Amino acid sequence: MKRAYSVTNILNKRFNTLDFEGIWKASLGQPDEAFSAIVWGGSSNGKTDFMVQLAKYLCNFGRVAYNSMEEGVSHTFQMAMERHYMGSVEGKFILLDREPWDEMVKRMKRHKSPQFLIVDSIQYAGITKKEYKELKEYMKSKNKGLVFLSHGQGREPKGALAQFIRYDVDIKIPVEGFRAFPQGRLNGGGEPYTIWHEGAAKYHGEIQ
């Protein structure tokens, strides 16, 4: 049987949180280092740019592996990396080129594997709920962060698995009109995060 915790046990338990600052703290708070999240939205709303920006910021706290299962090493992803000056995190960020799920899991179980894993996108992962839960529990046991990107359908993540993940993870981040709107189990935060200021202002009617 699993351990049962007393009130004192819980109140005295220490958690390792990520000391986010500035706009990231205002939006995502200071999540546990083993946080889980899903980001979703419609096409051309800024999801990829948000994921690259998030990956770059996470590099302040450990190495990041970004599995581009959908797009792979492409010109458009290269441009996104150039837009956000990813050269500044050389050595802290690796891009996996459509790495199959099983190989990706093996990579994350290696000694000194990256601290954070981003999976883009869940629709291209080709996995079951069981496989998702196994990875999530493993990452949590190792105090590692896990982020999924999902296509959107209306204002919801697309598909049964993406919907399941949405209700299971700590942080839910819908993206619309070049803004991310964090929800869920936030340790502080909750403010919208602007991905591209000019595009967001036009989309949301703040400028003509």
Image (tube, rainbow, N blue to C red):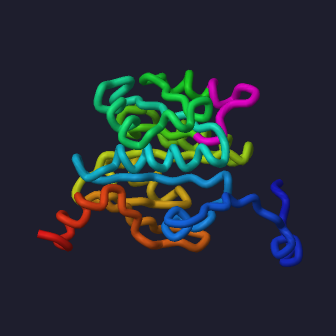
Q: Is 78 covered by the magenta stretch?
A: no
Q: Main secondary structure of the magenta part?
A: loop
Horizontal side of 27 relative to 112 (left or right) equals left
Q: Is residue 40 above or below residue 139?
A: below
Residue 186 screen position, x and y as percent:
56, 68
Horizontal side of 150 relative to 34 (left or right) equals left
Where, by quadrant of the figure, is residue 11 drawn?
bottom right
Where, by quadrant of the figure, is residue 103 drawn?
top right
What residue sits 21% from the left and 69% below the top?
A: 204
* Quadrant (top left/top right/bottom left/bottom right) for the N terminus: bottom right
Where, by quadrant of the figure, is residue 110 drawn?
top right
Residue 193 screen position, x and y as percent:
41, 64
Q: Which residues are magenta?
A: 106-116
What residue sits 35% from the left and 44% below the top?
A: 48
Q: Nearer the viewer, residue 108 or 2?
A: 108
- Note whether residue 185 is visible: no
* Quadrant (top left/top right/bottom left/bottom right) for the C terminus: bottom left
Q: Is residue 198 above or below residue 98?
A: below
Residue 102 screen position, x and y as percent:
55, 24
Q: Nearer the viewer, residue 31 or 13?
A: 31
Q: Nearer the viewer, residue 196 or 192?
A: 196
Residue 13 screen position, x and y as percent:
83, 67
What residue sits 38% from the left and 23% below the top?
A: 73
Q: Is residue 79 above or below residue 102?
A: below
What residue sits 35% from the left and 56% below the top?
A: 195
